[in-house]
Amino acid sequence: MTATLDAGERIIEFPALTEAKSALNAKRDELAKIFTEAGPDYDMAKVKSISGDTQAKVEHIRALNVEIDERKTKVDELMVVARAAAQAKEHGGSAEPGSEPDGRKGAEDGLHFKDGRRKNLGEIITESKAWKNYERGSDSGPVATLNIDLKTLFETGAGWDPETTRTGRVEMFPTRPAPHVVDFIPQTTTTQAAVVFMEETTFTNAAAETAEGSSYPEGALALTERSHSVRKVAVFLPVTDEQFEDEPRSRDYVNNRLPFMLRQRLDSQVLLGTGIAPNLLGTENVSGIQSQALGADPITDAVYKAMRLVREDGFAEPSVVYARPSHWESVRLLKTADGQYIWGHPSMPGPMTIWGVPVVETTAAPATKILLGDYANFSELAIRRGIDVQVSNSHSTFFVDGKLAIRADLRAAMIHHRPKAFAEVTGL
């Protein structure tokens, strides 16, 4: 085997390495030629060096990339050996003859030359059976055992333990995002403890054609006062003094998570709240909303029938549909008789609408129902006070325990002005 020293790269250039580099460059040139033919717009139709349609050409490029990666790995492996050999050649004369005990002189072994000079690792590798008997073009060569004497290692157990620093990322507990539901509900402000309004509960339209001299038909109107109390959503968290003092990010973390808890709970209350103090009144429990049973209908049909009730009986136009992901799944996966997806191919983002109305997937929706309605015109989330965060050590024994009580709350009322403008699909 012959080898040459490349002083620029400080490597021993030997035939196997030269051949591997040549093969790698050939594949790189082939790939470059393809993209030169394709031009700056990557038009595969212009590529004549590869036969077949665009898909076939793309597959050829993909295979070529894989082959380039494999050849590059081979070159990298050989370069490790080449650099070691160069270091061995460069520093081979650093030790003076006679530096080893006299008993080493005159006989060459696996670790020493005849003059007693100790071989370094690069020299041991280049003189090994595996190196000398390597055949060009083969994927593997003979195996040799290197007789290298080992001294006591300065390793982890006897030296420093490795220092590990956290990345700074905090992976949050998997939970429902918020806000999500209230984004589709108009928000107002109130300065009262309750939101009071009048609802027209009687409307009798007796207007009719009347003959001359006859009595006018009598109509009827009646108003009823409605009141929705402002409710408080609250949470508190105990934290030690040291946690805030020693970790600067902990304060921001708590300040972000507590309001998130409130918004998440509010999302649930505007749909599911019972209205019994201290709960808000959610859509599911509003008296007088429309109801459509699923029965034997597919969900799409039942939802449309519920929308029809809102339009026909509530004289409103649904603005949003709230459904659990498990319920929306059956709609998203609907197919035609020949297997085509109705709500869009799996490779494309499907329309988050049903019958033209936006759909909000949320686990805040009821487990057995879909809720919908004209939230845009006939609902209102009245905010008495937005999120307020306070910190104190006066709770219980927190002062002497070195703890802080961090509390957050908000006050709001949920109003459905026209119950018949909302509907539920039941039996899911």
Image (spheres, rainbow, N blue to C red):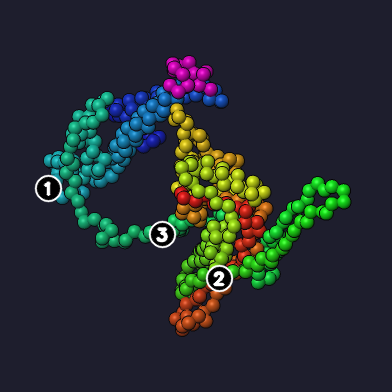
Quarter of the view holding residue 223: bottom right
Q: Residue at x 67, y 49 (%)?
A: 315
Q: Is residue 296 visible?
A: yes
Residue on which the image places disc 1: 103
Which quarter shows the N terminus?
top left
Establish if 33 lies above or below 165.
Answer: above
State the residue in front, 217 or 50.
217
Quarter of the view holding residue 112: top left
Specify whether 354 is left or right of 130: right
The amino acid type of the residue labelled 3 equals: Thr
Residue on which the image places disc 3: 165
Establish if 129 lies above or below 287.
Answer: above
Closest to the camera, between mark 1 and mark 3, is: 3
Under tag 2, what secondary structure? loop
Under tag 3, what secondary structure? loop
Closest to the camera, between mark 2 and mark 1, is: 2
> The magenta stretch spans which residues?
43-56
Residue sitting at the far front: 213
Magenta region includes residue 12? no
Magenta region includes residue 47? yes
